[in-house]
Amino acid sequence: MERKTHLTAEEGKQELEITRVFALPVDLLFKAYAEPDLVEQWMSTKVLKLDNKPHGGWRFETTDAQGNVVFQAHGVVHTFVPNQQIVRTFEMSNAGFPPQLEFLEFERLTDDSSQLRMHIVFRSVADRDQLLRLPFAYGLNMAHDRLQEVVSNSLSY
């Protein structure tokens, strides 16, 4: 199956460029990143905090069937422009990765389609490359597939 989320990692640079076109209007794509109930559905994680405003913050947590925490991430929101842009930090707890800076840009393509562009800046090329050795691209594509499915299904209510 073709991956619809495209990732570009230029040699020697400490950044990633990620793009994905969704069959969703831009306002619904943006809501998938801004509304806790939608984030929880497509990311399959618990949203403990999602304060979408400059200097706001966010915290997500995933537990296994026994209630053990298997994933925790958090950050600070720097810019929040509805239907256009989110700039935030991203840090995983207990993962050995330093914080990264994420620029998410939401672009209307047509009434029924939009594009997400993510520019992620890492502390170093080595940190970026360490993440790329994990199944990051595969997991992100799966998450975006789920985002498309969850938001599309919510339209039928």
Image (spheres, rainbow, N blue to C red):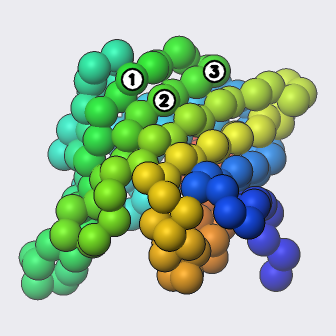
Is residue 63 visible in the rendered image? The answer is: no
Q: Position of residue 114 (x, y in %)?
A: 78, 35
The residue to which callout 2 is attached is 87
> Taking 82 as reference, is 104 above or below it?
below
Three-letter amino acid code at the position of disc 2: Val
The residue to which callout 1 is attached is 78
Quarter holding the C terminus? top right
- Give the mark nearest the N terminus, 1 or 2: 1
The residue sitting at 11% across, 84% down in the picture is 66
The residue sitting at 68% across, 30% down in the picture is 106
Is residue 33 visible in the rendered image? The answer is: yes
| Mark 3 Cα shell of 10 Å, populated few (<14), some (14-19), many (≥20) | some
From the viewer's perspective, tell me whether residue 24 is left or right of residue 75.
Answer: right
Q: Seen from this angle, which residue lies furthest left?
A: 67
- Give the mark nearest the N terminus, 1 or 3: 1
Q: Are marks 1 and 2 in contact (CB under 8 Å)?
A: yes
From the viewer's perspective, tell me whether residue 7 is left or right of residue 93.
Answer: right
Three-letter amino acid code at the position of disc 3: Gln
Mark 1 and mark 2: Cα distance apart in space: 5 Å
The residue to which callout 3 is attached is 84
Q: Position of residue 146 (x, y in %)?
A: 58, 62
Label 2, secondary structure: give it: strand
Q: Seen from this angle, which residue lies furthest right?
A: 110
